[in-house]
Amino acid sequence: MSKAPEFSDIDMDKSRSIMPVFEDNPACVGVCEDCEVDVCPPDIILNLVRWQQAITVECGRPYKDPGARAVDCCDGVINVVTDASEVDIHEPGDYTVTYTATDAAGNTATKQRAVTVEDRFPPHIHFDGEAVSGTITESIECGAPYNAPVVTALDSCEGDITDRIFAVGDPVESTTPGTYVITYTVMDSSGNTAPPVTHRVIVEDTECPVITLNGEAEVTVECGARYTDSGATADDACDGDLTAQIHKEGAVDTAVVGTYTITYTVQDLAGNAAEETRTVEVVDTQAPTIYLTGEKKVECGEPYIPPLVRVYDFCDGIIETVTITGDTVQTTVPGDYTVLYTATDAAGNEATEEWNVQVEDTLPPEITVSGSTSVTVECGSSYTDAGAHALDLCNGDLSGNIATSGTVDTNAPGDYTITYTVTDCAGHTAAAQRTVTVCLTTIISFVYFHMIFRCFMAT
């Protein structure tokens, strides 16, 4: 395999004399002494490459001509013009480089060098612009985007021959774990085949699924309230939706104050596990509820019956201890009274309920006539009224406040009415009456007796 000529490879043929030897024009040998008439052209001597005049160049590589020298018997060393324009380094074939030298007398000499452009090197395969060879191994995460390399082929002679690449293998499925192998080969027009390049892509699942909580990760629930967990979702880059595979552990007892943890776990097909937790805080911030049942209105003087008390707390249930403060109900004193009932749950939440009692005087006093309510008095006799007494549930004994109206004339027979009236502090009035009858029964008897007596004397 030849390489482009370098100066170090050029043999300047220094063993030869600087005098022309006229290898190409033997007729000029021996005539150099007469320079009056110079009819002999210069002698062109090609610089050798590895002791050879002919040169073989690899296609696509730069051609650097080794040059030549020209010696004239009269002018000595003269300039050589090189024409290498015919050489096309991108097209294999045989080319000629022409050297021309002209002396002062106008005698011109030419000489040629044979140049062969050969394509003996194979193309190169590139991944993303970088030359590669052998086996290229790449690992990607399952579910991640797969960016396949841009595969190109460059030939030193023909340039870009990407369209001639031949690939054998399975396309990469980035969502399916496994090993995918694709082999690339390419051949140039000269039949040179690039060494095959194998691209080995390993799709592996090393990432855990992602669990996303529905709702907040920290939840506060009131004691006694109902708690419904909002759950979670799970997604895996490789296996997709794994929500149905989530395993939930933990429970919340909303009847007991405390901190509860609910744990969600899920595992993908590769065994990668994920875990997420939610914290549920059961708190008691609500005060108990006090229920009072009973009669709030009390008649003055009647006994007061306190209400039935019931206390319920969502967290503690029934609370037995109740503190009673406020006013003391005095049933003999009309007015409004406020009684306070207070209960405290285990968390220290306090509730107070008012019980407003109204002591009112709606009944009148009660008057009782002393003695009989109907009295008969003999005409002409004296009458002393027995009076009456009065009692009020609120004001007590009002006998001293009784007003008596009406008189009895015992000298005049007839019916007389004595009225007793009394009013309590609330303005309620009561009245009672007594009827007194004045009779003439004694006079009638005397007359009758007198008539009998007269009758008796007459006989």
Image (cartoon, rainbow, N blue to C red):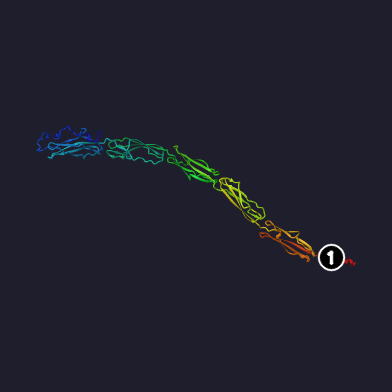
On screen, 335 above or below 79?
Answer: below
Q: Which residue is mark 1?
A: 446
Which residue type carries mark 1? Phe
- Is 222 in front, or is 340? 340
- Is 112 in front, or is 139? 139
Please state the total of marks drawn on the protein image.
1
Looking at the image, which residue is at 58% across and 50% down?
A: 352
171 displayed left or right of 27: right
Helix, strand or loop under label 1: helix
180 displayed left or right of 68: right
Query: In the picture, which quadrant includes the C terminus?
Result: bottom right
Residue 52 on image: x %, y %: 20, 33
- Is 127 in front, or is 431? 431
Looking at the image, which residue is at 89% across and 66% down?
A: 457
376 displayed left or right of 398: right
Residue 282 on image: x %, y %: 53, 44
Query: In the picture, which quadrant includes the N terminus?
Result: top left
* Mark 1 residue crowding within 10 angstroms, few (<14) / some (14–19) / many (20+): few
> Outermost residue, front direction?
400
